[in-house]
Amino acid sequence: MANARLQISDLDFDQIKTNLKTYLKQQSQFQDYDFEGAGLNILLDILAYNTHYNSYYLNMVANESFLDTAVLRDSVVSHAKTLGYTPYSTTAPRAIVNVTVESGTTTPDTLTIPKGSTFASNLIDNISYNFVALEQQTATKANTSFVFENLNIYEGSLVNYDFTYSQLSNPKSIFVLPDANIDTSTIKVSVSPNAGNTFSETYTQVTEVLDITSESAAYFLQESKNGNYEIYFGDDVVGKALTDGCIVSVEYLTTNGTAANQANGFINAALIGVYSNVVVDVVDVASGGAIRESVDSIKYSAQAQYATQNRLVTVKDYESYIKSHYPSIDAISVWGGEDETPKVFGRVFISLKPKANYYLSETEKQRIITEIINPKAIVSVAAEIRSPEYLYLLVNSIVQYDPKKTTLDAETLKTQIKNSIISYKNTNLNTFGAYFVLSDFQDTAISTVSDSILGSEASVRVQKRFTPKLNEASNYLIKFNAQLHRGTSTNKLLSTEFTVTDLTGVTRRAIFEESPQSYTGISLIQITSPGSGYTTSPTVTISGDGSNATAEAVVVNGRIQSIKITNRGTDYTRAIITITDPTGYGASAVAVIDGKIGTLRTIYYDSLAQRQIINANAGEVDYDNGIITINSINFLSVNADDGLIRIDIEAERGIIQSLRNSIITIDETDPTAIVNTLEQINR
């Protein structure tokens, strides 16, 4: 039949087979043919499968032709290469240690820890990891000891390979490095003219093609199709070419990546020199270990780096460049000094959240600035890395549920709710720029756990943690970056216990609390008109629905310069200021009622469980701006295993935003962080 047509746009197997049957039935030769019960049905299956395979193959080829849609790592890496991007490798954790070697004698004068010296870490998940020194270090003897300060050691094993270059068999001078878990930042390449020549020339990795000439001793690095890395060399136009028969020596570190992060104890695995009396003290615990870059990360980073062209100008430039060159971070926030209060021009601020810890060490921050940022930064712009400021949420939920609609017991349901809250934290919080919305939290993290849940009510307290300076009087500024709720007698600020001395020198076990007198007293009197003609200090009268507030006026050149509060008073919700004096006239002022500002005090409980005040003015709580100021205080000790003081208070609003270097999180290891109470409602 001349009008028979196949529907070529249908590519599913069943549709293809149906189209083939329809096409054949339209032919006069097969009008009465039983397609289902004959051998031709098998042939139709083969034709349909063949067409389906071809369409799938062509579709995948089209997908792999573009960076956005590619799925295979080889394809993504190849596209990234055209944009000048090399995916980062597995990265070795680095620790900094001081090594003290006791010789027992006064000679020799110096001792060297050679490159390749190994140290065994403490057990992590019952495994001890090997750390190695990548550079030798020499120390001069002090008395009978050698002290090697700030020695960098890296997790992994040093390996060496020698390749003989043959222009005939390897015209492109490409050498595949056989190990998968290479830390490419540790690769060192040298080239000798031939096997019998001891002279070798060190080659450096190309990072900018514009920086090299035909005489530059440089090598290129790329990821090969099998997932391994390979190096290749120039052609006497871009980089020096290899000579036939030369020996290419490659040294690098193979590592386990993140596995050894947080290693904080080491012993030397072999003698140092001839000495075995060695003590290793940790300066910085092992950190910075990261796994190889993922396919999704390559897609993002390759395009971002191509857009930035390796420059550090905008916020996005810093974000993409630091992520690609320091892969062990989980999140990054960058902002300019113009967003600071007060403004700081000519400076960029960076906050990094590492994958394996809460904070980076000061040494690691300086290394990032020196080795990664400064070589690419604008000369007139200085970078400063700030540690993240964590705001911990303490969530207390009352959940009503119908036991008839679930087979789960109460404890199992509680566990599921807790796991859902942790999942909500991992998805929506725990990073820079996150929002916590209480209503969304209740709908997403609680109500969706089970059909038996009828409703929930949640309250949120916010907590800050800080490390006090012991045996040293210091001031502290605690920023919550969220509005705080003015406390009541049953719902107020709480803190970790700590020890201080009272006015009589007796050591007390104390806590911080909000002072009740600060709830509704007078916090400030603002002058609206200074008046004139005053020869003496006028009388200031405070009237309103509270009691006991008093103040004094300060007169300068016949005008009221300020009014000092001598007693804040209590129980005011409104107040009127009246100024009277027989000599002057025209002065007026208004009162600012407490509620936005609270007083912090230190207290302890005596043997009769009676509250005793140590310092009635230990600090101030700015509820609107979420800032707690602690006046000079000398902490003697802290009643917490981690040495941190925790201050928690209810949030004023159910919407909390993390700004700049603040991160909102929920500490699932804290038993007070997630508290769920179940109420049965039988319907």
Image: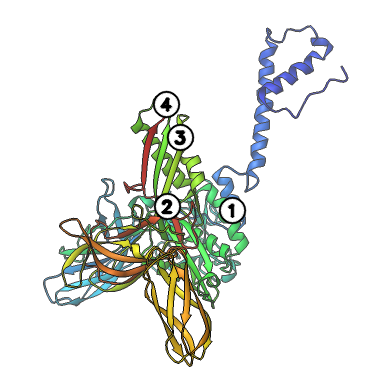
Relative to 8, residue 613 above or below: below
Q: Can you give x and y, in whole percent of width and height, for residue 59 in the image?
A: 67, 36
User: Tag 2: residue type?
Assistant: Thr
The amino acid at mark 3 is: Val
Position of 438 compared to 146: left or right? right
Q: Give the residue type that dot 1 points to.
A: Ala
Numbered tag placed on residue 449 in the rendering: 3
Q: Kindly report which numbered mark, 4 or 2, lies closer to the viewer in this rendering.
A: 4
Q: Which residue is mark 2?
A: 665
Q: Nearer the viewer, mark 1 or mark 3?
A: 3
Q: Are marks 1 and 3 in contact (CB under 8 Å)?
A: no
476 versus 579 height, above or below: above
Q: Could you say where residue 334 lies in the image, as x and y percent from the top left?
A: 52, 64
The mark that comes first in sequence, 1 or 2, is 1
Q: Which residue is mark 4?
A: 682
> How far is disc 1 from disc 3 in space, using C-alphas?
41 Å
Is the Cβ of the residue at disc 3 closer than 8 Å to that at disc 4?
no
CB atoms of marks 2 and 3 within 8 Å = no
Q: In terms of secondary structure, where does tag 4 sit?
A: loop
Residue flagged by tag 4: what amino acid is it? Asn
Structural distance between the alpha carbons of marks 1 and 2:
34 Å
Cβ atoms at labels 1 and 2 below 8 Å apart = no
Q: Is residue 14 above or below residue 318?
A: above
